[in-house]
Amino acid sequence: MSITTERSGDGSELTIRIEGRFDFSSHQAFRHAYEGEGQGVSRYVIDMRDTTYLDSSALGMLLLLRDYAGGEKADVRIINCNGDVRRILTVSNFEQLFQIDD
């Protein structure tokens, strides 16, 4: 599991890339990614191109990010999900909470 971040040129967008399994063992790294790099950020992009697995603790971490980013007013997109990850997000009704782009 690897979590990396990249800020946009103007600093307003933070992309968080998750590689491998996104589960409880990712908690500290994921939290540090948005709290440590998130000053001045108004938009978050979670890139799951290389995410192979997602469990309920990962869903909880996404909800914590949403709260940190402003709750209902948060601008958080989840992108590049494979079929299995997308299915988990759909079954969990995360499409109502996040913008999810394939």
Image (spheres, helix red, strand yellow):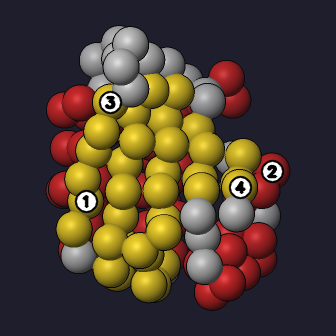
Query: In the figure, residue 91 lies in which quadrant?
Result: bottom right
**Which is in the foreground here, disc 1 or disc 2?**
1
Quadrant into which the N terminus falls = bottom left
Is 40 left or right of 87, judged from the image as shown? left
Residue named by callout 2: 96
Q: Which mark is residue 3?
A: 1
C-alpha gap between disc 3 and disc 4: 19 Å
Three-letter amino acid code of the residue under disc 2: Gln
Q: Secondary structure at mark 1?
A: strand
Residue 24, placed above or below residue 95: below
For marks 1 and 2 on the same chain, the one whose residue lies earlier in the sequence: 1
Q: Secondary structure at mark 3?
A: strand
Three-letter amino acid code of the residue under disc 4: Asp
Q: Secondary structure at mark 4?
A: strand
Residue named by callout 3: 7
- Confirm or deny contact between disc 3 and disc 4 (CB under 8 A): no
Q: Position of residue 73 (x, y in %)?
A: 67, 23
- Confirm or deny contact between disc 3 and disc 1 (CB under 8 A): no
Residue 52 visible somewhere in the drawing: yes
| Residue drawn at x 69%, y 47% as measured from the top left | 98
Is 64 left or right of 16, judged from the image as shown? right
C-alpha gap between disc 1 and disc 2: 25 Å
**Which is in the foreground here, disc 4 or disc 2?**
4
Residue named by callout 4: 101
Quadrant into which the C terminus falls = bottom right
- Confirm or deny contact between disc 4 and disc 2 (CB under 8 A): no
C-alpha gap between disc 4 and disc 1: 19 Å
Is 7 left or right of 86, judged from the image as shown? left
For marks 3 and 4 on the same chain, the one whose residue lies earlier in the sequence: 3
Three-letter amino acid code of the residue under disc 3: Arg
